[in-house]
Amino acid sequence: EDKVVQSPLSLVVHEGDTVTLNCSYEVTNFRSLLWYKQEKKAPTFLFMLTSSGIEKKSGRLSSILDKKELFSILNITATQTGDSAVYLCAVEVGYGGATNKLIFGTGTLLAVQP
Amino acid sequence: EADIYQTPRYLVIGTGKKITLECSQTMGHDKMYWYQQDPGMELHLIHYSYGVNSTEKGDLSSESTVSRIRTEHFPLTLESARPSHTSQYLCASSDLATLETQYFGPGTRLLVL
């Protein structure tokens, strides 16, 4: 059975700290790994990773994928209170095209204190 | 502006009522999805569609039904709501050209009394 596991489940830090969120997976027919940020309601897209070892960056956020060890990390540097959210990891599985689907982890709840 | 919309945002309804949750997207995406998410839990795929007149059941068994008569519209219907249907329902869409980068609507929070 396809499985996506995120750790830690929750994390409380102070503004300015750097955090690392983990996502490991066991799936068949891996296609890509995606990170989402969920505040209050719907998830918003952050990154999509398909190749090992290539870091994706967007401002203070960065992410990298290790397809050999089957995990990804999401780093947030110089955290701000606005970074407080649930961060979701999802793995795309399938044979390509229309039949692919996403398997979501339970998320990591990040709380950034002033 | 291209976007994905869900209505209603909140719904409180009695047991046995028929309800339809609306989802529309203006991005011209072929694929659309419905997810169910209980508080603090992962998203579970309950329905998806490849395009007009195509619908499939997802990983989580659901008593709801969907239809896809128009590309931009993917409503979800519960014929007889029960308290066990209380949850958040998220609609999403994606373009085959961008693999599985799914864009989510704001969600509908449903409470069945």
Image (spheres, rainbow, N blue to C red):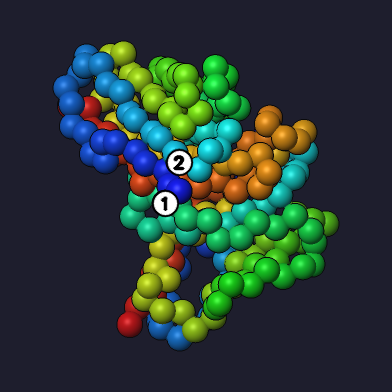
Q: What's under tag 1, amino acid-wise?
A: Glu
Q: Is residue B68 above or below residue B44?
A: above
Q: Quadrant of residue A16?
A: bottom left
> Is A70 situated left or right of A44 in this image?
right
Judged from the image, the secondary structure of the residue bearing numbered disc 2 is: loop
The residue positioned 75% from the left and 43% from the top of the image is A30
The residue positioned 29% from the left and 36% from the top of the image is B7
The residue positioned 39% from the left and 24% from the top of the image is B76
Of residues B1 and B74, the one nearer the viewer is B1
Of residues A84 and B48, the one nearer the viewer is B48
Q: Is residue A54 visible?
A: yes
The residue that mark 1 highlights is B1
| Structural crowding at the residue carrying mark 1, measured as other residues with C-alpha within 10 Å and reported as few (<14), some (14–19) or many (≥20) | few
Q: Quadrant of the C terminus of chain B?
A: top left
Q: What's under tag 2, amino acid-wise?
A: Thr
Q: Is residue A91 visible?
A: no
Subunit bearing disc 2: B
> Is A85 situated left or right of A50 in this image?
left
| View extreme (right): residue | A68
The residue that mark 2 highlights is B26
Subunit bearing disc 1: B
Of residues B109 and B4, the one nearer the viewer is B4
Q: Is residue A47 above or below residue B21?
A: below
